[in-house]
Amino acid sequence: MSEQREEILKRLQNKFEAIQQNTDTHLEGLVWAKPITYWDYIQPEALLSLQIQRTTLPDEMVFIMYHQINELLFKMILWEIDQVCDHSDLTAEFFAEKLRRISRYFDMLSSSFTIMGDGMEVAQYMKFRNTLTPASGFQSAQYRIIEFASTEIKQLIDFRFRQDPSLSEDFEKAFEHLYWQAAGKDHATGKKNTLITLFEQKYKSEFLRKMEAYKTSNLWSKFKTLPQSVQDDEQLIKAMRHYDYTVNVTWVLAHFHAAEKYLESGPKKAEATGGSDWKKYMHPKYQRRIFFPDLWTEEEHKTWGEF
Ligand code: HEM
């Protein structure tokens, strides 16, 4: 037996002893193990069986698949954010590297939004959207979790109440004042609509747990724990600003313009499937969502969504 093989066997022995397992049993198991294949590992059959249309219109498939691609990328983004949030001994290099990965994924989502804007026939969209009412991308849980993981709750409070400190201390209260509550309420009665009622029935308790979990471990709080010299690092600040701007302006505007194209073309002009006053709600200049507030000048705050 070669020295190399002996060394490997020794390492295996150590590994299995540490978990009270018999090495010979595991080696014997290898004799019968199937060779790994692409299809067992990547699971394309499972993945490709998840595109179920509700209408006969072919462009509905583009709509479904692009949303699923978004959800996969959201998962990749959360995977990287969590590595930063869970890190107990964060360095500037690690933080910057993960931030660049996260931004790359969001850049992909922003630049590919033309798949929604230009990749479907308006006439088909206007038909199949009725079958999807009252569902909306608004109900994407991962999108909300990315926000909780990126910044402090105060930054996600409706712009009109953001300066009230009592709101961000109590998560139940904060939840009712998150900026996106505005899309879920009838302005006249204050009553929640079906879009948000169903969303909250499914995810509210998970969201409250996430708000608590990311309270001090979100990206913005983590950044502020880094030594001042690191926080002042120009490259890191550039990467932070890029991520903030991409999520809260570039993506939001790409989404806004795609929505505008379809919703403005219908007979019931500008009515969203989720039923929100979407134009006012969606434009970044009204919501002023900013993850990393101290990294922007006063002027940039004032003109958010317009530069
Ligand atoms: C033609 C395509 C699309 C249209 C017309 C559209 C329209 C809308 C509208 C009108 C809203 C406001 C809530 C409502 O009343 O429904 C909304 C929210 C939202 N949509 Fe889309 N959407 C499109 C594609 C997408 C895609 C591909 C995603 C990716 C997952 C997405 C994710 C979201 C999210 C996360 C929100 C909530 C944003 C916020 O709270 O500021 N949408 N969408």
Image (tube, rainbow, N blue to C red):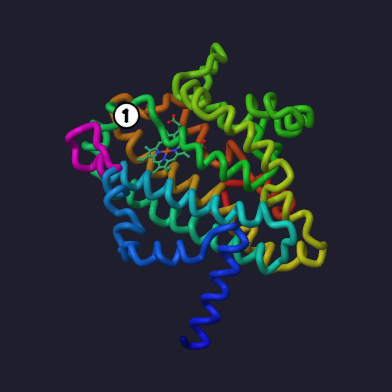
- Badge 1: how crowded within 10 Å, few (<14), some, or many (20+)? few
| SS type, badge 1 | helix
Q: Does residue 302 appear to the left or right of 196 in the view shown? A: right
Q: Residue at x 77, y 66 (%)?
A: 230
Q: Residue at x 60, y 69 (%)?
A: 14
In-front residue for pair 176/287: 176
Q: Residue at x 55, y 50 (%)?
A: 78
Tell me the amino acid under the disc marked 1.
Answer: Leu
Q: Main secondary structure of the magenta part?
A: loop
Q: Residue at x 42, y 50 (%)?
A: 72
Q: Is residue 117 visible?
A: no
199 shown above or below 147:
above
Q: Among all residues in the image, which is located at the extreme bottom?
A: 2
Q: Does residue 6 appear to the left or right of 292 in the view shown? A: left
Residue 10, picture quadrant: bottom right
Residue 265 point in image, percent of width and height: 30, 34
Name the residue that disc number 1 marks: 132
In-front residue for pair 305/125: 125
Residue 68 point in image, percent of width and height: 37, 45
Q: Among all residues in the image, which is located at the extreme left?
A: 56
Ligand 1 resides in the quarter of the picture at top left
Q: Which residues are magenta?
A: 50-61
Residue 121 point in image, percent of width and height: 23, 43
287 shown above or below 16:
above
In-front residue for pair 244/64: 64
